[in-house]
Image: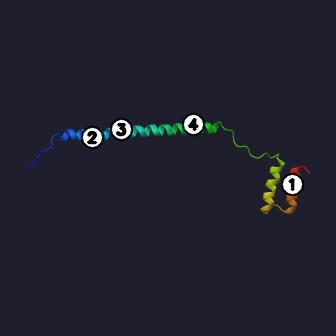
């Protein structure tokens, strides 16, 4: 003869409550994690917005201009004559 387990419904209800409670706790933890990530991202964006843009090399800097011209000359974009003329102009000669 088979014995019938007692408390089957109670045990099933308790198991369901534990599972539901665990799922609720996990969901709450995820919400907190995502909220913290959103806050960090907003703070990072606000910080970046406050930072000045990186300065480009000044057009008045003759050495930067000569270096740029030298790269163009080495790449074959400028001829020897063009490079010499542009360099003299950049240096104010």
Horizontal relation, residue 35 to residue 63: left or right: left
Horizontal relation, residue 86 to residue 42: left or right: right
| Residue at image point 74% right, 46% down | 56
**Could you tell me if residue 77 is visible in this image?**
no
> Which residue is tagged 1?
87
User: Does dot 4 land on a helix, a strand or a loop?
Assistant: helix
Query: Is disc 3 surrounded by few (<14), some (14 to 19) or many (20+) residues within 10 Å?
Result: few
Q: Position of residue 17 (x, y in %)?
A: 28, 38
Name the one closer to the observer, 92 or 22. 22
Foreground: disc 1 or disc 2 = 2
Q: Are marks 2 and 3 in contact (CB under 8 Å)?
A: no
Instruction: Tell me the distance, in whole angstroms, between the alpha carbons under discs 1 and 3.
Output: 71 Å
Occupied quadrant, residue 47: top right
Instruction: Tell me the distance, in whole angstroms, between the alpha carbons under discs 4 and 1.
Output: 46 Å
User: Does dot 1 land on a helix, a strand or a loop?
Assistant: helix
Query: Is disc 2 surrounded by few (<14), some (14 to 19) or many (20+) residues within 10 Å?
Result: few
Q: Position of residue 74 (x, y in %)?
A: 79, 61
| Residue at image point 36% right, 38% down | 24
> Which residue is tagged 4?
43
Query: Is disc 1 surrounded by few (<14), some (14 to 19) or many (20+) residues within 10 Å?
Result: many
Q: Identify whether 92 is placed above or below 14.
A: below
How many labels were placed on the picture? 4
């Amino acid at each position: 003869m088979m014995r019938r387990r007692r408390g089957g419904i109670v045990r099933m209800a308790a198991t369901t409550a534990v599972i539901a409670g665990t799922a609720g706790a996990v969901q709450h933890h995820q919400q907190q994690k995502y909220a913290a990530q959103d806050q960090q991202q907003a703070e990072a964006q606000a910080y970046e917005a406050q930072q000045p843009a990186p300065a480009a090399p000044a057009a008045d800097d003759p050495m930067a201009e000569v270096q740029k011209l030298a790269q163009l000359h080495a790449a074959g974009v400028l001829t020897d004559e063009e490079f010499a003329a542009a360099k003299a102009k950049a240096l104010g000669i």
